[in-house]
Image: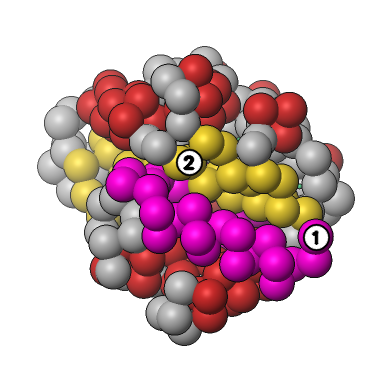
Amino acid sequence: MDLIELAKRVAEIVKSSDYVVAFTGAGVSAESGVPTFRGRGGLWKRFKPEELATPEAFRRNPKLVWEWYKWRMEIIYNAKPNPAHIVLAKMEKKGLLKALITQNVDGLHQRACSKNVVELHGNIWRVKCTSCDYKGKLDKPPNVVPPKCPNCDSLLRPDVVWFGEPLPKSAWEKAVVEASIANVMIVVGTSGVVMPAGMLPWITKKKGGKVIEVNIEESAITPIADIFVKSRAGEFFSLLGKELKIM
Ligand code: OAD
């Protein structure tokens, strides 16, 4: 089936389903110029997660960790939502999508005007104090790293989930509820290997829902996908937006 036929088929399923949710990963932002973690050009090919994305790494060298986050913030600051973010937001506005669960920390779904977004791994623009209860938001990359808490002068850290840390409880609980009640989960641009997030499509499937996957290559989710769309996310969602008459 070619991409246009697949878009027609997915559009029909979306229109005839009561509760559609989306689950996204780094691949949805790839066409916006934000690097993915795995695969060609992936961040974990060039950097070691244990040196940059663990609580131990931060304790050892907060400046290095913050420099890496600052570099990623600069990329994200200059990136724009692509047609995949935009069509997902328009689908929600039209009542065709009930919730969007993301592993991304880039905030591009919200910039595209998605409202019901569940962020499983935090958000790169939020910061929290390593000592007191202070939580804040940055609107651009910090000039000086590591930034300090305005209340107690301790180090601030990015409010993201690092390896070895639990997911925010309320986000995870909401994601499990959404995955459980979904008739259809559209999975976009994730390798599906990071747990527990990667379990969500399996929950939808087990509860009798359909899984539709959009990815440039097969992933850990593909074996349970009812429809696998081998495509770049932005390209496919442009076609889907046309079929749904929202683009
Ligand atoms: P990955 O980098 O593991 O996977 C990205 C996926 O996107 C791969 O399956 C690619 O094939 C696919 N992809 C790349 N470009 C694409 C495009 N233009 N259109 C569609 N698909 C494309 O990213 P995630 O699955 O999001 O965790 O990674 C999960 C977590 O691992 C991240 O949230 C992060 C990382 O360590 C934390 O930081 C806690």
182 or 156: which is nearer to us? Answer: 182
For badge 2, the amino acid type reads Met
Q: Which residues are magenta?
A: 1-30
Residue 156 seen from this side: no
Q: Quadrant of residue 236?
A: bottom right
For badge 1, the amino acid type reads Met
Residue 209 seen from this side: yes
Instruction: Indicate left or right for 168 with 51 as reference.
Output: left
Residue 33 picture location, percent across and down = 66, 68
Residue 215 picture location, percent across and down = 71, 51
- Numbered badge on residue 1: 1
Residue 94 on the magenta span = no
Instruction: Look at mark 2 in the image and give the residue it sits on.
Output: 185
Residue, x 80% and y 66% (percent of image)? 2
Residue 8 on the magenta span = yes
Marks 1 and 2, how far apart at CA: 21 Å
152 or 190: which is nearer to us? Answer: 190
Q: Quadrant of the N terminus?
A: bottom right
Instruction: Indicate left or right for 8 with 173 as reference.
Output: right
Disc 2 CB within 8 Å of nearest ligand 1 atom: no
Residue, x 22% and y 49% (percent of image)? 136
